[in-house]
Amino acid sequence: MKKLLTALITLLFVVQIFAPLASTSAFARKNKKEQNEEALHTQYLNLQWWEKYNDPILTGYLQELYDKNHDLKIAALKVMEGEKMVKVSLANELPQITFDGNLGRVMRSSDQHFGNMVIPSHAQYGYQFPFTATYEVDIWGQNRIRTKSVEKQLDIIKQAERASYISLTSAFASTYFNLVKTDKLLEIQQQIVDIQTDIVQKTQKKFDIGLCSVNEVIAEEKMLTTQKELLNNLEHTRTILENQLKVYLSDDSKTIERTDCDSLAIMQNLPLKMDGTVIEKRPDYIQSEDNIKKIGYDVRVARKEFLPKFIIYGQIGLNAYHWDKLFNNYSQLANVGIMPSFDLFSGGRKMAILKLQKYRYEEARHEYEKAVLTGLQEVNDSTAQLKTDLKNYDESVERYNLEHRRYVLMDHKNKIGAASDLDLLYNKQTELMTKREEVSNKINCLISTISLYKATGGQDLFSIKEPEQQETKENI
């Protein structure tokens, strides 16, 4: 009994000494873990790529998006939940120690007969203080494989978090550039409305002096209403886009600032040809790979369920019927043993679970093949869209330059009296409409680069080499 008391006192003493050190170590590990998570999230944000758009306002908003967006916070919490699930699985691999104390009083209301021995009615106290330890011997590695499955599930959740960063930053940047475009289109459309108003007034004057018919006046007034309608729609679009950005930033009262469209530039020398390996960094591709591995572990666990289990158990403590005799030598309680367990009949449950996991494995394999095809399609579609938008932008720039030359010539003719003011206004209006197409194509090019960035899994597009360049490099 003295040895037992000495062991308990020593254990309490050691815990008392090392508990502060353990808490300090845990705090240090926590800080290091937080730093690693911060670095990982910064990598997910990929500000180095977004800085290539040369728009400090956009990069500032993306940092604010990282700090405030609710979807990103939810994704981070899901990762934390997955980490705790791994910890739970790891805990199941370790021995379990429990304390189940029992304080009670037994009262017998009648005599008890054990053969010729008679125990009269009595009342009796019972004091039990046992520590129970159990450990399932992982002979077949089943528990370890189950933990590996949970760890793969955590990897899948982490890729889902990375996908949230790529998706949200891409959606925010696209909405931001659309807002920049809308601002510029509103500016141009207001000029068009002003010019059309002058045209209506001058046409009315021509009608008043009999130089045109009333149909011409009606046609110009009808055109004015059409241009005003376009202006109203643009104002509505601007409001919608601003509201969307406020939701992304989780601040409904925020005033959305943005750069001027003219200060934006089209990225040059982007890769317009990519091989199939570019999709290997996509979150959905990595998730599909991890899912196959995870379900592969689940299949192995289901197979090992058919094997017997062995549980080692032990118990040590105190057991007495009188409080004052609780610490006597004969009140000590101890036992140890091994308990084999094997299900002789389970109604086909284990076989059904094994087949279920095999079906899930086949499903995961098809999901992987689908992810490969989907990734290639999105990369090819985004590349084709970028090519088309770049060509359209070049065509619109050339078209605007031609219209601008026409306007300059018409302005010269107006100054020398060879063209009327109405002719000059018509040419200016046509030039502005062409400018409107150029602005739209310019922003479309920027949004196409964002789509390609998203399709490649958030990679820096300038770091991707075209297939011909890769072959040349290999030959060198």
Image: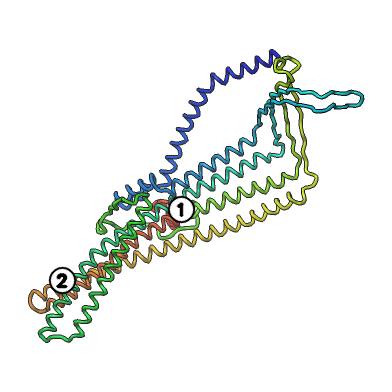
Residue 127 lies in what quarter of the image?
top right
In screen coordinates, is 109 left or right of 285?
A: right
- The answer to whether 155 is drawn above or below residue 236 in the figure is above
Lower sequence index among marks 2 and 1 = 2
Q: Nearer the viewer, residue 346 or 439?
A: 346
Q: Position of residue 179 (x, y in %)?
A: 31, 59
Residue assigned mark 2: 408
Tell me the crowding category of disc 1: few under 14, some 14 to 19, or many 20 or more residues within 10 angstroms, Cα based. Answer: many
- The answer to whether 155 is drawn above or below residue 372 in the figure is above
Split into 4 quadrants, where in the image is the N terminus? top right
Colour setup of the view: rainbow
Q: Nearer the viewer, residue 405 or 254?
A: 254
Q: Position of residue 381 (x, y in %)?
A: 44, 63
What SS does tag 2 mark? helix
Which amino acid type corresponds to the residue marked 1 in the rendered image? Gly
Residue assigned mark 1: 457
Residue 439 lies in what quarter of the image?
bottom left
Q: Position of residue 433 (x, y in %)?
A: 25, 70
Identify the residue at horizontal 58%, vertical 19% (top origin): 14
What SS does tag 1 mark? loop
